[in-house]
Amino acid sequence: MPLRRSHPAIVPAVLALLAGTPAAAAGPTHRAPVATPAPEAARDRNAAALAAGDLRFPITRERLSNGLEILVVEDHTVPVVTLFTFFRTGSRHERTGRTGISHLFEHLMFNGAKKYGPGEFDRALESRGGTSNAFTSEDVTGYYEVFPPAALPTVVDLEVDRLTGLTLTEASLQSEREVVKEERRERVEEDPMGALDELLQATAYMAHPYHWPVVGWPADLEAITVDDCRDYFRVHYAPDNAVLVLAGDVQPRAALDALRRGYGAIPAQEPAPAVVADEPEQKGERRALLRRPAQLPALAMAFHVPGTKDGGSTVFALDLLQTILGGGESSRLQQALVRDRPLATSVQAENLTRIDPSLFVVRAEARPGASLEALERGIVAELERLGRERVPDHELQKAKNQSRMDLLRQLKTSAGKAELLGSAAIFFGAPEKLFDRPQALEQVTAEEVRAAAARFFRADNRTVVHLVPAEAEEEARP
């Protein structure tokens, strides 16, 4: 799960699965429309397209000479603008001994710069009616602002200021380190399901950086220095390592002029070192046991699956399996384990969106009186059945319809458009991959779904962690 700055969230973190064929690299020149439509025409066009189920909408693109990729989407539905900045850096780009620096740095980005000092970023933005937030995941760090159109020059000024003159001091590092340590305590050390997820990742991955948590290991957080942060900033927060998406009530040409003036002079940097992603194939089931205070027993189960970089159409089959297993009250796991056989109070299935080889995860909390062993057998039975029997046509179509509607709901706002386009660019190499998703889902067959389940939901590809409630005194004993 992405970790967010401790600030009211404006846009849900959607790292949507948007597969398709590789796209050509963006050219150096601006692909502007022949004519800029009136706001009313653009609003009517966007509304009619979504109502008809047509996901495509115009994107104005430009790549600056410093490598910054800019996407502008005109949407006059409401007088609101969203600016998203995606940096191709996350916990995947860290090293042993300095885990957690990506998320820690996200916090440091709000600590003041040359022109706008500590606290001034939020004050300047909020005084103009805007809000901001940020998130860090394994593969990407994102920053976004939602604001009235008239505030665009201020927002650009704020972002450029911290990209060119960020203040990094021992005092700011120590302050934000304590904030992140408290966040880790809340989300992992005091949250049984957070601790379960952390152990699951660490057990499923042996060599890949996905082994460590986005929030970092405690000792590593303590070890990070100001010099580490300066090096990280120089390498990873370069314009040629970023995608900027502006969506909402703007005129594309005028908006691009403002972005060129603000960002054009920021120098490019040498590319970051390549991520070592050589995870050995799992050759047998792995198990771990977690004892800690908790109200109910729980379990998490993971299977290695392809990531977005090399997954191709398999990613879509796995995405549909996620919906078939855990998408709504009528999903298979909900029906089998919560309704028909009262083994679980809750159950989830998730095909994690990651660039490198990823995980398909099932999580469940046992109902009082039910054993974890019985709950695990019930989950495995449903997974194995998917590998033996083809999903009925009506059930497969239901999953496709659910996925399509989820996407349409996200596209109703300028913020949703901006996040989905940027995610497509980061995870699949081109923002236009967003538009390929509905057709790619429709093309997945029942046999492809069955084959994916049989291929990946195997015992020797499985990692299982059981959470067993323990009294606080018992946990403290050596």
Image (cartoon, rainbow, N blue to C red):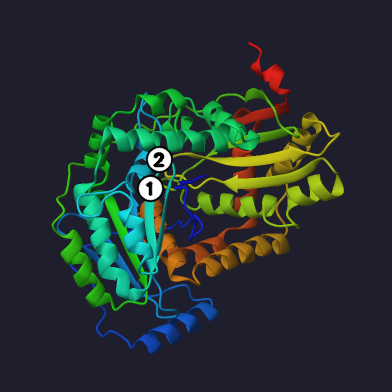
Taking the image as shown, residue 418 lies to the left or right of residue 296, namely left
The reply to whether residue 21 is in sight is no
Q: Tell me the element at label 2.
A: helix
Taking the image as shown, residue 118 lies to the left or right of residue 381, namely left
Residue appearing at x 64%, y 37% in the figure: 193
**Residue 8 location, x and y as percent?**
49, 56
Q: Tell me the element at label 1.
A: strand
Residue appearing at x 59%, y 36% in the figure: 194
**Residue 349 location, x and y as percent?**
64, 46
Marks 2 and 1, Cα distance to the nearest angstrom?
Answer: 8 Å
Q: Residues within 10 Å of mark 1 (few under 14, many from 20)?
A: many
Mark 2, mark 1: which one is toward the viewer?
A: 2
**Residue 402 location, x and y as percent?**
63, 64
Please name the residue that numbered disc 1 is placed on: 141
Residue appearing at x 40%, y 46% in the figure: 309
Amino acid of disc 1: Thr
Seen from the viewer's position, the closer of residues 340 and 462 is 340
Q: Is residue 143 above or below residue 98?
A: below
Amino acid of disc 2: His
Q: Residues within 10 Å of mark 2 (few under 14, many from 20)?
A: many
Sequence-first tag of 2 and 1: 2
Q: Is residue 186 above or below residue 291?
A: below
Residue 76, picture quadrant: bottom left
Q: Is residue 367 above or below residue 389?
A: above
Please name the residue that numbered disc 2 is placed on: 103
The reply to whether residue 380 is in sight is yes
**Residue 342 location, x and y as percent?**
85, 43
Q: Are marks 2 and 1 in contact (CB under 8 Å)?
A: yes
Residue 222, picture quadrant: top left
Q: Residue furthest top?
A: 478
Instruction: Count up the numbered dots.
Output: 2
